[in-house]
Amino acid sequence: MIKGLAITPPVLGRISIGRVVERNGKRLPEKDDQFTITSQIHTKDGWIAHPLDETLRKQSPNGKLRSIPVTLLFNDPDLNLRAEYSLFDRSSGRPVCVGNGDTCRRLTTSGIQSLPCPGSDNCELAKGGACKPYGRLNVKLTDDDELGSFIFRTTGYNSIRTLEARLHYFQAVSGDLLACLPLELRLRGKSTAQSRGTPIYYVDLTIREVMTLEEALTQAQQTHAQRKAMGFDQQALDAIARTGFANGAFEDSVDEATEVVEEFYSDQNPYADSMQSKPSLTDKLTQLTGEVETDVACA
C-alpha cells in the first residue's frame, strides 16, 4: 500500500444530525433533532439524500429519523470509532496536529513530528478552542455490501463519550462479538448550563429497540457461528484495518477538507474573499478560533 496514505473503510454515505446553511453571507452549522442520511454527492443545494433516508423515514411514526438500525465492521471499538484531539488549518481543511492526550502527530516546518500531547485544555497551540475532540464512526446500514459503511462525524463531547462507552461495554458483554451484534444509532436530547436550557442532541448506540440484550447476544453468537462456518475471518479483517489506519499520519484526506472546515469552524474562512498573499502556517495558526462545543456541528 502507498506509504503515508491512511487506508480507511469504504464509505457509501454520510450520517449527520445537523446541516450547514448560508446566512448573511456566512456558512453556519444549524442543529437538527433528527438524523439525515446522505450520499457522498454535494451540489450547490447541499448534500443529496441517500435512498435509505426516505426508506427509514417512512418507517418512523412521525416521519422524523431518530433511530437507525446498524451493525459494525469490526470487533475492536477503536477501529469503529476513531476519536482524537484534532486541530485543523481552517483555510485549507488539512490537519495540523492530532493527538490522544499522551502523544500527538504535528505538522511542522520540519515535517510531521511526534510530540507530547497535553490535551486541548493545556496546549498552547490549542488556545481559543481551535483544538477539539473529533470522532468518526463507521457503521453498516445494508447487507448488500459487507465491507461498505456510512460515516458519522462529530466534534461533540456527548456523542464521543457515549459512543466510546457503549462500544467498549458491548464488546465486553458479547465476548468480543461486537461486529455481530444487532445495534441501533439513537438520537437523544439533553439540556446543560452551557446550552442555557436549549436541547442538545447527541448520538447513542444501543441494542435494537425490538430486542432484549439476551436476544441480541444470542443472535450475535449465531451470526458468529455462521460466519465462521463460511470462512469469514473477523480477526484478520480487524488486523488489516488497524494496519490501514496506521499507514497514514492523518486519517482525513484532502478531498474532505471542505467538510472538515464546515464541521470545525462556523465562521467564514478569513482568506476566502481576500486578495492578500497566502499566509504562512504560523499566520494561519494565530488566526484559528473555536466555537461553543455542540453535538450538531457536523453537516
Image (cartoon, helix red, strand yellow):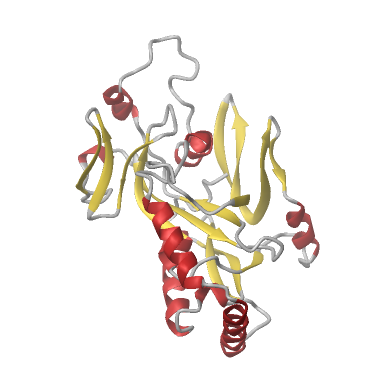
Question: What residue is shown at x 42% (from left), y 64% (from top)?
Answer: 239
Question: What residue is shown at x 46% (from left), y 66% (from top)?
Answer: 238
Q: Horizontal placement of 170 versus 11: left or right?
A: left
Give the total of numbered labels. Answer: 0
Corner quadrant of residue 128: top left
Corner quadrant of residue 218: bottom right
Question: What residue is shown at x 59% (from left), y 84% (from top)?
Answer: 225
Q: Residue furthest left?
A: 116
Decide which of 250, 39 is in the foreground and name it. 250
Q: Horizontal placement of 64 versus 219: left or right?
A: right
x%, y% of residue 267?
47, 31
Question: What residue is shown at x 69% (from left), y 63% (from top)?
Answer: 142
Where's the C terminus, which quadrant? Answer: top right
Residue 286 visible in this rendered orientation of the protein: yes
x%, y% of residue 70?
62, 67
Residue 194 visible in this rendered orientation of the protein: no
x%, y% of residue 250?
38, 44
x%, y% of residue 233?
52, 72
Q: Horizontal placement of 107 versus 196: left or right?
A: left
Decide which of 151, 209 is in the foreground and name it. 151
Look at the picture and state if 193 lies above or below 69: above
Decide which of 121, 193 is in the foreground and name it. 121
